[in-house]
Structures are given as C-alpha cells and as structure tokens.
Image (cartoon, grey):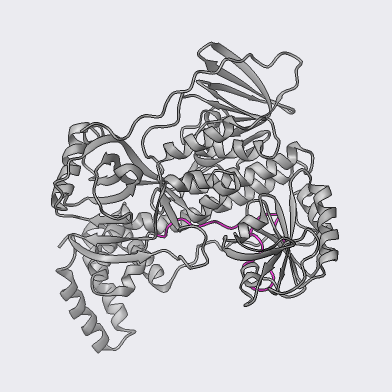
Amino acid sequence: MSSAYPRPAPHPPAEYPSTPAGAAPLPVVVVGGGPVGLAGALGLARRGVDVTVLEAGLSASFGSRAICLSRHSLEVLARLGVGDAVQRTALAWTGGRSFAGAGEVLSFRMPHGAADVRPPMVNISQSEVEEVLAGALEGAPTARVRWGSRVTGVRPGADAVELDVETPAGPRVLRASWVVAADGARSRVREALGLPLAGTSYEGRYVIADIHWPTDRPAERLVWFDPPSNPGSTIIMHRQPGDIWRVDYQLAPGEDADVEVGEDRVRARIARHLDWLGSDVPWTLEWRSLYRAHALSLDDYVHGRVLFAGDAAHLVPIFGVRGLNSGIEDAETLAWQLAAVVHGTASPALLRAYATERRSAWQQNVAAAGKSTRIMTPGSPGWTATRDAVLALAATRPRFRELLDPRQSSATHARTSPLTWPASGAAPHPGDPLADRAARVRTAAGPRSSSLDAERGTGFAVVGVGVAAAELAAGVDRLAGELAPEPVRALLVGPPDGPVPGGGIVLEDPDGAVAGAFGAEPGEVVVVRPDGLLLCRLPGPAGLADVAAAVRAGRAPAGTRPVREPDRPAETDLETAWRVLSEGLDRASADGREAFLTRLALLLADTVPAAVLARAVEQAQHDDGRSPRG
C-alpha cells in the first residue's frame, strides 16, 4: 500500500546578508519555525512588527508529534486568522474510553454546550498546523521565514542580541533588538546561554507512531491498560485526518529503547494490537519516534532581550495534550505584550507579566498532567500498586473513575500576574480565560448571529453592562489612543430591543447569560485582554483611565497585589488518599509493604465500625480478580 502521508514540501533555503555594521538591529528575530515560533511571529506581524523567523530545517516537521488542539487553541488560531483553515482539516472529538485488559473502566465526555462555537478538542498533525501558519506568514508584509538557518551562537547585549547563524550560503551574524527562543526541547539558544531546565523526569518511555489505517472507527481517545495484545503495556490511539492513526505504547523498564523503536519491532507490536481488535484492514507504518515524560521549566522566561516560549521554556508530560496547547498560549501572550514594547506603548516591564503568567501556566499544567502521568506511567512501586488497584476498582465502582480522568488540556489563568487586578465578585475572576460562545448582535445595520470572540476582536475589548453608551464610547476612544496600534473595541450588553448607538455593537442578553459569561453586574465595565483573558472589572467607564497606565507599566494600579497560588494544587479527598497511600508504599521497604498495609488497615479499623472494615475486606477480595495484573 502506498503512503498516504507525504512529507511536507521543502522551501528554498534563504539567502540574506549579515546585519551591516552600524545598521539598526532587526526588531524581532524568532528562533524556531515550529508551531509556537510561527504563531508568535504571526501574532507580531499582524500587529505591524517587523519579524524574522530562523528555522534550521527546510520544511515543516514530519510526523504527527503534537496532535490535539484544544478549544482555546482554536480560539487563538482564529484570532491569528488561520482558525478556519486548521478546523477545515482537523477531526473534532469530544471524549474517549479507557480499558483495563479487555474491560471498559472509563467513558468520559468533555464539556460541550449548545452555545460553544468550537469543539472541545480536534486532532490534526503538528506538521499540518505548521504549514498553515507558514503560509499565513508568507502573506504578511512585515514577516519573513529564513529556512535552512541554524543558530549556533548567542551573544546578548544591553541594546541588542547577536546571533551566529549557519546557512547554506555560509555563516551570517544577525543583530536583533529582541530574540524569541522557540526552538524546542533541545533549544540551542537556551544551551548557548547556559540556562538549565529544572523539575521532574518520569521513568516511563513510549514509542509513538503514525499508521495509515483506513477504518470507520470514530475519532475518540482510546486507552488500553495491560491489553491481551501487549501484556504489561499501555496503548493509546487517536484518529487523525486522512485515515492516519497515532499509536503510543509504553515500553517495559527492561526493554532496550534503541531496539524497540526499530521498524520491525514497531510493526509487530502494532500488528498484534490491531489483530486483537479484529481488524483485517491493511495498514502502513508512516513514522515513529520515542517519547519520555518530563515536567521541566526554566526559572524565568525572560533573560534580558531573549524571551523563551514553548518547549524551549518548559516541558510538560504528553498526557492531557498540554505541550502544544500551552505553547500556543505562550505565543499569543508574548506577541501582544512584546508588540506593545516594540511600538513604545509599554515599557519592557510588561514582559515581566509574560514571565510570571506563563511560568504559572506551566505549574498549572504540571499539576493536572502529573495526575494523568501517575496513571499512564506510575514510575514507582507505590504508584504502580495504587494505579493497578484503581483500575481494578473502577470497573465496578464509578467513584474511582475520577482518578482515571485524562484531565484534557484547558486554558490556563493568569491570576498571579502583576498585570492582573485583584479578584472581586463572582467568577470569572481577573486573569481567567473567557471562552467564546454564540451570541446575537445588533448594530445599526440590524441584528445578526455572531460570537463573543468575533465581536471582541483581536485587541482589547471593553464590555459595558447597562452603562451609558456615550460615556463608554468616550472612555474607549481615550484608551484606544493610548494603546494604539493595538485595537480597542467597545461592546454594550443590553436587551434585544434597546437602542443601538451610532456605529456601536450591542450584545443581546435577554436571559443575562452574556453578562454572566463576563461575571459582570449592571453598571460594571469589563476589560478583556488581546489573548482573551479578563484583565479587570471596573465600577464604571471612569476607571478605564487606569488601564493604559497599567499596561504601560506592566502592573495593576498601586495598592493591588497579585493572587498567591497555594503551595499544593487542589485535590479531591480521593486524590489525596491516592497520593498519601502511594507515597506511603514507596517509603516502605520492598519486603515491608505487606506489614505497612496491615498496620494501616488496623489503624483504620480503630476509626471505623468493624462491620465497615469487614465489608471493605470482602469487597477488596472480590475486586482483586478484576485487576489487570491479577
């Protein structure tokens, strides 16, 4: 069977000179032409910033790599002008199923309501996203992608950064006022500056592969723990466009990764699983690689005039599909904040907000992904024992299924940012992302169907609930003049039959749902950032005078303090019990775990009625036979 997965077409290598001596530096150079670098560059270019992308390769990447885009990432891509192009190709999905052995232990659905404009998740290969973004950059008058340009040296200075670049035409030296390092997990920029990543690396290793397998199975997340086809392993499958399926499977601790990633071994493992599924459809192996889960980050994402984004700044475990989605968030936030600095609207202090926000986002992602990773690749005897016990119990006890929830990626908040006003009133709180939703709109031309994002636009939005239109318009006009060239749009939330001010936009709100989406009360004004986060909630239009000053300074008004995040992420009682028991088992010696569990049971017996303990013992004996390791 011929391949249905062609490699991306190569681009001609770029030919360009070094920055001449005495010449002004390039405004912004983005190192790395992956999805994060390209998205960041496109966001800058759409704000009129001159931007140069240096990409070592001559084409988009090959292989699925990151495949799942969240609803929030689709909103970001829509603001970049490429959302429709991506969504036309992608496959939407809303949930998935997990199995222990051959038995189903979890069926989940992600939140998706009638007012949601986009699906909760889509599958599309990273390569296809890169090609869409690169195509959009080709049409941007202030942007260029220099293919075949590998950065080999970085020399930061007070006013500019010098980059040594290897090109097919020979070495070049470029000077840039700002450098965005988006060159991936093995970042050459990070290495050149001697900046280490710190955090946790997990033991589990996964082979990841793309196969062309033309079946009619639906697009959903499928996971098998200890399947009969590959005993002791964990297998994940996702459908992609063009009858391509992504297959991930875990290697055992003693298996040689170099051997197991060989083509014959990969084919054999996948063939056993597809045969077990009862498929006789011919398939081809298109691409394969090896993955190990990491939760690592730089301490700071801003180092002078060098800014880090995506995998160059942080790594998150693959489970819950947070890597690409968090990188796209990085790109959007960095684009509007760096553009404000380049245009002189804000001081470089605004970039401290970027650093704070996005490192907090990494911590949020790691907290959620860590729980998923403990299920997918436990990494220690204690966590392995409790994971297997959860799988055994989840078959008959629905409450334990919450621990198997993959906790799919969702938009992160910026509550701890110095730019964020203090929280007040109902959710959403300042710093929270505002999801897009369908809306009815009235203008002077009449009513139409739309969505909140379409009306908010790509810049700042000022939303007034039950305020005077003229007062709101005056405040927004002043704000727009101070934040230019970033656009500022005024929206009124009102009844379906109220007046429409000249040139204004009214969001109809017959049942209060639109005001509720902004967490606003009558008389309040809500300011939304260009990246869709709630910046502040004000008692009226007069407070808008403080917004431009805050953006310029990169800090909310004097006297406010960012929210402090708790030292440990929130846990349910069951999650706490799971963690405490796993850690207790790991602290016990290998030959002392039985005695530890016996002491634990007796201590619990001292706190619950004997009948309760007896019933629990009986149930545990009954469920033991359901264990995938049983």
Could you tell me residue 141's position as x and y percent? 66, 30
Number of marks? 0
Q: Residue at x 27, y 73 (%)?
A: 599
Q: Residue at x 79, y 45 (%)?
A: 484
The secondary structure that most of the magenta stretch takes on is: loop
Against 303, residue 77 (above or below) is below
Query: Start and end of the magenta stretch?
Result: 407-431
8 on left or right of 496: left
Against 456, residue 198 (above or below) is above
Against 257, residue 383 (above or below) is below
Q: Quadrant of the C terminus?
A: bottom left
- Can see residue 259? yes
Q: Residue at x 65, y 47 (%)?
A: 354
Dividing the picture into quadrants, the one containing residue 31 is top right
521 on left or right of 30: right
Could you tell me residue 112's position as x and y percent? 46, 65
Dividing the picture into quadrants, the one containing residue 493 is bottom right
Q: Residue at x 17, y 69 (%)?
A: 624
Q: Quadrant of the N terminus?
A: top left
433 on left or right of 542: left
Could you tell me residue 194's position as x and y percent? 55, 30
Between 5 and 154, the one lying in front of the other is: 5
- Does the magenta portion include 462? no
